[in-house]
Image (cartoon, rainbow, N blue to C red):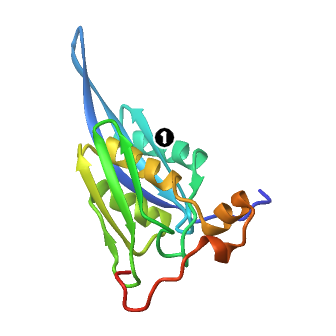
Amino acid sequence: MSREEVAYTEKLVAINRVAKVVKGGKRFSFSALVVVGDGRGRVGYAGGKAREVADAVKKATERAKRFMIRIPMREGRTLHHDSHGKFGAGRVVLRAASPGTGIIAGGAMRSVFEALGIQDVVSKCIGSANPHNMVRATFDALQSIASPKYVANKRGKRISEVTSRRAPGGDR
């Protein structure tokens, strides 16, 4: 292993017990939804199924580590801009927040932000509160976030031309 070992934050979002009816009765298995992040802008999620809870969580964690994405963050603590995401009947609104605000979010979204390493964000879920839909809608919103550096390169401009200076004492 030549790569340095990264300490991952693992958040168990939901566990579901599933029953399959067979000839001798019911056979139970478990599905787990896990969010994994490095606390520095990389995060992933996955589900796992197994006959035991521990095995389902382990499968989900390994899969989430394989499918991690990088999210640009402003000052390493919040989002660059507001964003909307949706999946199924679930919709989320994410807003950048000033220092000291904290994570204002519900259960499933909070897990994503904590694993990602975001410290200041305001979010709202609209519609479905299903943890699977909330996590996927949150990822949809996070993937639409672009850093000023990326936008400036794409447009062929300087970063100062893309960003606006906020007025002191303004709303944000």
What residue appears at the point 37 percent right and 91 percent down from the top-left corner?
Answer: 169
Q: Position of residue 58 (x, y in %)?
A: 47, 45
**Of 106 and 167, which appears nearest the observer?**
167
From where the camera sits, is residue 14 visible? no
When the figure is inspected, residue 15 is found, relative to residue 79, above or below; the finding is above
From where the camera sits, is residue 38 visible? yes
Q: Position of residue 136 (x, y in %)?
A: 40, 44
Say which amino acid is labelled 1.
Answer: Lys
Q: Which residue is mark 1?
A: 59
**Of 139 and 36, which appears nearest the observer?**
139
Q: How many marks?
A: 1
- The quarter of the picture where residue 130 lies is top left
The answer to whether residue 117 is left or right of residue 89 is right
- The quarter of the picture where residue 49 lies is top left
Q: Position of residue 17 (x, y in %)?
A: 26, 34
When the figure is inspected, residue 6 is found, relative to residue 88, above or below; the finding is below
Classify 10 Å Cα crowding around label 1: few (below 14), some (14-19), many (20 and above): some
What residue appears at the point 60 percent right and 65 percent down from the top-left corner?
Answer: 147
- The quarter of the picture where residue 102 lies is bottom left
